[in-house]
Image (cartoon, helix red, strand yellow):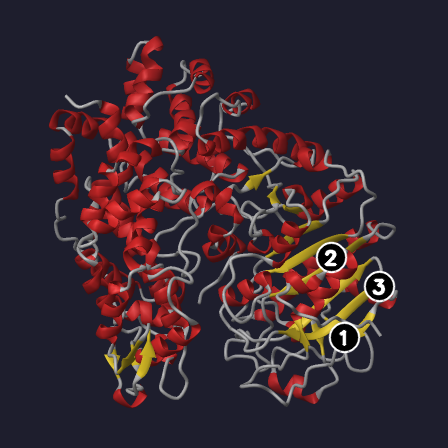
Amino acid sequence: MTDRSTVSHLLRRLTFGPTAAEVDAAARAGVPATLDKVLAPAGRATPPEVGAFRPGKEGRDDARRQATAALEWWVGRMITEAGAAEKLTFFWHGHWATSVRKVRSAALMLDQQATLRRYGAGGTGPLVRAMLRDPALIIWLDGQRNTRRAPNENLARELMELFTLGVGAGYTEADVKAGARVLTGWRAERTGGPATLVARRHDPSPVTLLGRTGTFDTDAYADLLVAHPAHLPFLAGRLWARYGADTAPDAATTARLVARGASTVAMLRALVSDPSFVDTRGRLVKQPVEWMVGAVRQLGVDPKRGRARILGGLRALGQVPFRPPSVGGWPAGTAWLTTSSTRDRLASGRALAALAPEAVDGLAGAARTDRLDALARLLVVDGWTARTRAVLAGAADDPRLLLTLGLASPEYAVH
Amino acid sequence: MDTITRRRFLTASGVVAAGALAAGATTYGLRDILGFHDEEPAGRTLVLVTLYGGNDGLNTVIPYADPAYAENRPSLAYGPDEVLTLDGDLALNPALKGLHKLYGAGRLAIVQSVGYPRPDRSHFRSMDIWQTASPERPDTTGWLGRWLDTAGGDPRLAVSFEPALPPLLAGATSAGATVPGGTLNLPAGVTSGILTGLGTPSAGESPQRARAAACFADLVRVRDLVAETAPEEDEEAGGDEQPATATGGQAPALDRQLALVTRCIEAGAATRVYSVSLGGFDLHADEKGAQEAILASLDAPLSAFVERMADREVVVVVYSEFGRRVRANASDGTDHGTASSVLMLGAGIPGGRYGEAPSLTDLDDGDLRHTTDFRDVYATLLADVLGADPEPILGGWTGRLTFS
């Protein structure tokens, strides 16, 4: 048997909140087998047919319904799928942060997600190539306004700053301009279909890009970026920020992740196997989606019955999938810890507890003195501080309240 | 783009995540602010009112006498008999009765056609530009956050009453405080005693968990003070009844926010900057009635606040991320535009019209050309209200507003 807290830590970070049963199974299987299982290629995700985007006023209601259908489907999947794939998809979504608010077509958002799923586990070369012809990303970053006559630097700038190299990491304003030239001419339609490169809008003239002069096409540009010495350290830092801690990894950890850079899943495996990973316990603030999906899974809330509470709670807490606030993605770390989010976690916790009769009965069935430990087991919390223990003990007669407080507690909000 | 709310914008990452927020966002209780006094006699205080969504400047400060105004907006224009006249050219929206009175008393300054080069019509980018004061390229710090860095970095110097820190208050090494002042009802069974208990520090806890715990303690303090300042606040039933569509976490109504500002200022808080906001201005369709309603919800609390602060060293500034297009669209609304008026009121601000009026006929692709750079406004506020050197904060910008 492997120590429960070791596998709990690992599963809390790699998946959307393990259930007590998943921790039990992992403790029996041991760390290597658990990693094999959790990081194994995921089964095919079949998104709902939401229908095509229709422009104009009459399409507006459809678009809203389609976006909601896509959102419900994805959140439902996060709840029902136990492996690391959904969280990795969510990581990439926050990384290539694209919002349906501007893209407007839910079908294009789902197409983008399919790309993130298809290439997200492997090396970043194919991923960057595919994303540069992703219709949702092109619309989101004004790629179709980037033409030979009027280059638009939006996509090229974010590509280097946010997606591949990191701000100020080995590229210049001239590289942004040159990159924008290379990417001129792509067009995408909200109504569907692949992005196309329109020759008369494309600027084929040679440029000097990242120290090389020549004629580059989109794929050559993508390859240049993923081969850039800043790329893998940047990606290692981004993975660490979401899976490790909100303080930067040390140089040795970064080097170990970079060494496994041939695939993102291998980098993740290196991350949770790194000697410094153990010290990140209790230091990563859960994003609202992590907090909500984990709670729903652990309490056994029926996603369909809980639908309104789950989506309403995510809105209140400020993180709705498919709707990142900007191309920079969602905040990380203590930005999520405010007075109002604390209140919102209490309110959502209470609402979820009301939808979880089995969890409530389970706690009620435990002897009064065992209820705090039963709660910790249910929520996969390693233990309560004396502070929290004292508060929970006062609520032990009321299992619903106990659940509410457990979900809002500092020990649960930060994992 | 569909409707944008303050909430969505305020969780914006670009600025906030990269800025000081990630290094430790500061949520203070109102009491911390009320008890925050300075040895030095306080200088002036800035109250910045952000209108989210892009307020239609031409139907706020209305060029009613310009024939091009009515021509461009057949069913959206106000007739000369509907508006609150300022002079032979300009008038205010009929909803702005309080501001009209203040203008008549020489206490409202209207800076016309304020904008920035190469206008961006994205709400996010444009609001980022206004909040970072960096039109050329994205910045990770807000202009008042950079001021805070130079002013010593105490978060209580710059306060927002919104749930998340507005990017404008994020500095490189410091960040302003958020003091949520909205209704903070608790679910059934959750008492102040429980919050206090969970808010107790625990030895050896990680900084992140300590922060999570501190939020409970802050929640108690804020609740106490919200209760003190608004005893009439209706009590909601238990949290189970909270509707799923609740946009919990949104900023409280503007009158609530300004009541909290009033309370802090009258308690002598050493806070120098307050950020408040009002959203809902993105009116692409059926604009007229909706804008009037929302302008009324700006006018009443704002003019009451200005009256109440009449004897104090308080300056109020109102801006939005952009104005709207000159021509109405086919849905009796307006689409995203460019330059717009900035309103300034309070200590040392001479009322009147400033800056060059925008031309409604010499347009840049259907949009107004700006005649005053927004950094002129900021530089003036930094120098004259906050007593700071604007140049290093505004990337070397040397322009200033002239009130003459």
Residue matched to label 3: B107
Choose the circle earlier in sequence order: 2 or 3.
3
Tell me the SS state at disc 3: loop
Considering only order in the chain, which callout, 3 or 1, is on the residue closer to the N terminus?
A: 1
Alpha carbons under labels 1 and 3: distance apart: 16 Å
Q: Residues within 10 Å of mark 3 (few under 14, many from 20)?
A: many
Q: Nearer the viewer, mark 1 or mark 3?
A: 3
- Seen at 77% across and 43% down, the residue is B265
- Asked if residue B115 lies left or right of residue A309, the reply is right
Q: Looking at the figure, which quarter contains the N terminus of chain A?
A: top left
Label 2 and label 1: CA atoms lie apart by 34 Å
- In the rendering, at what x and y percent does residue B108 appear? 80, 65
| C-alpha distance separating marks 2 and 3 | 24 Å
Look at the image and tell me whether residue A299 can be seen: yes
Residue A170's spot in the image, x, y percent? 37, 65
**Are the numbered discs 2 and 1 placed on the same chain, yes or no?**
yes
Residue at point 84%, 67% (across, down): B351
Q: Is residue A3 above or below residue B283?
A: above
Chain identity of mark 3: B
Which element type, helix, strand or loop, lies under badge 1? Answer: strand
> Given the image, on which type of amino acid does mark 2 rest?
Ala
From the image, tell me which residue sits under label 1.
Answer: B91
Which numbered marker is on residue B388?
2
Q: Residues within 10 Å of mark 2 (few under 14, many from 20)?
A: some
Q: Nearer the viewer, residue A86 or A344?
A: A86
Callout 1 crowding tier (Cα within 10 Å): few <14, some 14–19, many ≥20: many
